[in-house]
Amino acid sequence: MKGTIRFRYDSENDVVIATPHWNIETKEDVLVWFGQYESYMKRFGRKMDVIIVLDDFKIGPTIGVVWGEYRASVHQRFTRFTYRVNSDNRVKLFVNTSGVRYNVATEEAATIEDGLEGIKAARRAANIT
């Protein structure tokens, strides 16, 4: 397999923690990466709050636009509030570009715990318990 995503559901906080182990270089990579999100997230039957830990996630310089389109689809279809942890500079660039193009989340946190606090604050602001 080209790459994997380790998903963990934190039932106490009702949050999915996703840790992708990927080096996205081709459209085929993007499609497999997207399929892994789709396969896991559809089981909830609703949009989920997600923290994405990017310690082992890279994007090649020529695939960022395509990846950004599919990234936006993940957010539009499967997520409500999201935070990214430990993005490298290229990933940040493509995340922010995708965020502007498709009006999807770009929030970052220093740690998983900070991401949880950000999600809790977003829930409070939206009057979601």
Image (cartoon, helix red, strand yellow):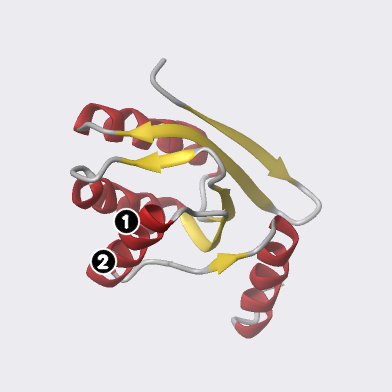
Q: Give percent across and percent down for residue 74.
A: 38, 49
Q: Secondary structure at mark 2?
A: helix
| Left or right: 29 in relation to 44 | left
Q: Quadrant of the N terminus?
A: top left
Q: Residue furthest bottom?
A: 125
At 64% from the left edge and 68% from the top edge, which residue is drawn? 119
- Quarter holding residue 96: bottom left
Q: Does residue 43 show up?
A: no
Decide: is 17 above or below 35.
Answer: below
- Quarter holding residue 100: bottom left
Q: Give percent across and percent down for residue 15.
A: 66, 53
As drawn, the label of residue 115 is none
Q: Does residue 122 show up?
A: yes
Q: Amino acid at mark 2?
A: Tyr
Q: CA distance from mark 1 to mark 2?
A: 6 Å
Tell me which label, 1 or 2, sits earlier in the chain.
1
- Quarter holding residue 63: top left
Q: Amino acid at mark 1?
A: Ala
| Left or right: 102 in relation to 112 | left
At 31% from the left edge and 71% from the top edge, which residue is drawn? 103
Decide: is 46 above or below 20.
Answer: below
As drawn, the label of residue 102 is 2
Residue wearing tag 1: 72
Decide: is 52 above or below 29.
Answer: below
